[in-house]
Amino acid sequence: MLYQPSPDRYSKMEYRQCGKSGLKLSALSLGLWHNFGHVNDFDNSRNLIKTAFDHGITHFDLANNYGPPPGSAEENFGKILAQDFKSYRDQMIISTKAGYTMWEGPYGDWGSKKYLVASLDQSLKRMKLDYADIFYHHRPDPATPLEETMNALDLIVRQGKALYVGLSNYRPAEAAQAIQILKELGTPCLIHQPKYSMFERWVEDGLLDLLANEGIGCIPFSPLAQGLLTDKYLHGVPADSRVATSGVFLNATHLTDERISKVAELNAVAEQRGQKLAQMALAWLLRDQRITSVLIGSSKPEQIVDSIKALDNTTFSEDELQTINTILK
């Protein structure tokens, strides 16, 4: 049966201007870091994309190495696009990245022009796309001159392989340099994707101010600290949780008594607000207008619907913010 998206999907979502650009992003974006590889159930992955789009999420975020195995998330996303979204490509923002290890040898990692151009060519083939809307450099490369990496991003836009470029995991000083180089090249940086949550707040020490001053968007990833900022671990480790199943990015060593105590206190604040902890954690990020969108991950369609309810209340009182900051100290 031919997929027909919800006709009222745009009324269900808030859209925010990405910095000073003309591009708007959905306040929540779907990240394909997990749950879209060849090891995952394809029909479930397909349902996740449909559920997101049906609820007004227009931005889908990938990287060359997402899977597992690396590349398989882009392959599966390409299949889903071909099967269900061929008529809706112009209503979607699709981003991908390169910067981490993708293939063996000296040309399959980091930030050389050779690697970035070749990687995006491969990504476009996997997704069966003519261009990506946003292409990111995924992490700074200490061995490649920043000018070379930024020149590669500029080249990619001029070749028509991406409409916009962004940075990910760049600290304030190196971000400022990269932003200036791109500006001089005539291909301004659109957006920065940092790791940011209640439990990881380094972006507040200069990066958010830099992006605001430069008119650049910000889209945090890992807003729930890999699932810690949910009620999932308040009463032990569920059998289907990330800690119990993979343990790669979140494992039992992260579940200290002190951390779980903080989660319980935050959960109490969320309950007073009429929200689940995960919803409050997303709303806490989105309360700041410097945040364009927040990347969510999901293994079940209902988790996406649940996350979207965070948009019902992104306003915090001074007392609530003070209580949260006290808990997080």
Image: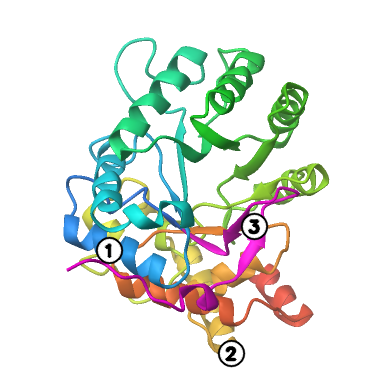
Q: For the residue labelled by badge 1, is the local secondary structure a helix, a strand or a loop?
A: loop
Which of 81/97 is in front? 81
Give the magenta-colored segment's residue range: 1-29
User: Can residue 47 be spotted in the picture?
Assistant: yes
The residue identified by callout 3 is 292
* Mark closer to the chain start, 3 or 2: 2
Q: For the residue labelled by badge 3, is the local secondary structure a helix, a strand or a loop?
A: loop
Q: Residue drawn at (57%, 20%), measured in percent from left and top? A: 155
Q: CA distance from mark 1 to mark 2?
A: 26 Å
The residue identified by callout 1 is 241
* Mark closer to the chain start, 3 or 1: 1
Q: CA distance from mark 3 to mark 2?
A: 26 Å
* Mark closer to the chain start, 1 or 2: 1
Q: For the residue labelled by badge 2, is the local secondary structure a helix, a strand or a loop?
A: helix
The N terminus: image quadrant? bottom left
Label 1 neighbour load within 10 Å: few <14, some 14-19, many 20+:
some
Left or right of 13, for residue 233: left
Residue type at tag 2: Gln
The residue identified by callout 2 is 272
Magenta segment: does it hold 203? no
Residue 122 screen position, x and y as percent: 34, 26
Identify the residue at the far right of this view: 213
Verify CB contact (< 8 Å) between mark 3 and mark 2: no
Q: CA distance from mark 3 to mark 1?
A: 29 Å
Left or right of 184, for residue 142: left
Which of 69/8 is in front? 8
